[in-house]
Image (cartoon, helix red, strand yellow):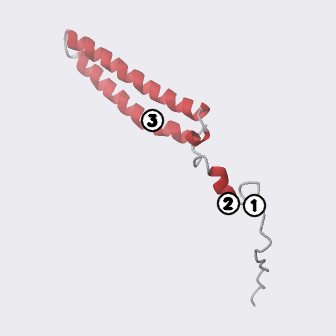
Amino acid sequence: MHPLLVLGALFPATALAVLGFFTLFAAERSAGRMRRIGNALGVWLFMLAALTILASLTAALFGPAQWGGRMGPYHDQMMRTYHPGWAGQTLPVPASAPTTAPAAPQK
């Protein structure tokens, strides 16, 4: 699981929860049909906040690799090209590549 997806969903979920709280607070002070609509809207905003968190957890746990924070579908190719020692499999060195000898220590 990649935690940045969950952390990235916390801001919209918090904003939705705050909006839901203030909607329920305003609905409590109103009367009649507006109270019913306000209560329904406040509950709906809280449900959307919970669904935002659940969707981010689902995407982090079961989604494709690029949702999990990898650098896209070419991640393995980039790692083998630019950092051959990090990727496990190294690219073969061409025969025409110059070999360098280690520098002699200076006194």
What residue does disc 1 label?
91
Residue shown at the point (41%, 37%) measured from the top left: 11
Secondary-structure class at tag 1: loop
Query: Marks 1/3: CA distance?
Result: 41 Å
Q: Is residue 60 left or right of residue 77?
A: left
- The quadrant of the picture occupied by the N terminus is top right
- Image location (x, y in percent) of residue 14: 39, 32
Mark 1: amino acid: Leu
In the image, which is nearer the foreground, mark 1 or mark 3?
1
Q: Residue 81 bears which disc, if any?
A: 2
Evaluate if marks 2 and 3 touch, with contact meaning CB atoms under 8 Å apart.
no
Are dots 2 and 1 in contact, CB under 8 Å?
yes
Q: Secondary structure at mark 3?
A: helix
Q: Amino acid at mark 2?
A: Thr
In-front residue for pair 58/32 = 58
Q: For label 3, count other residues whose C-alpha is less than 10 Å away and answer few (under 14), some (14-19) or many (20+).
A: some
Residue toward you, 20 or 52: 52
Write down the quadrant of residue 13 in the picture: top left
Q: Earlier in the sequence, mark 2 or mark 1?
A: 2
Question: Looking at the image, is mark 2 or mark 3 earlier in the sequence?
Answer: 3
Name the residue at the left extreme: 31
Name the residue rendered at 32%, 15% in the picture: 40
Residue located farthest toward the bottom when viewing the structure as drawn: 107
- Residue plotted at (37% across, 27% down): 17
Quarter of the rendering containing residue 101 = bottom right
* The disc label shown at residue 71, or none: none
Residue topped by disc 3: 10
Q: Position of residue 72 (x, y in %)?
A: 58, 47
Instruction: Say which quadrant the C terminus sits in.
Output: bottom right
Spatial separation of the CA atoms under disc 2 and disc 1: 7 Å
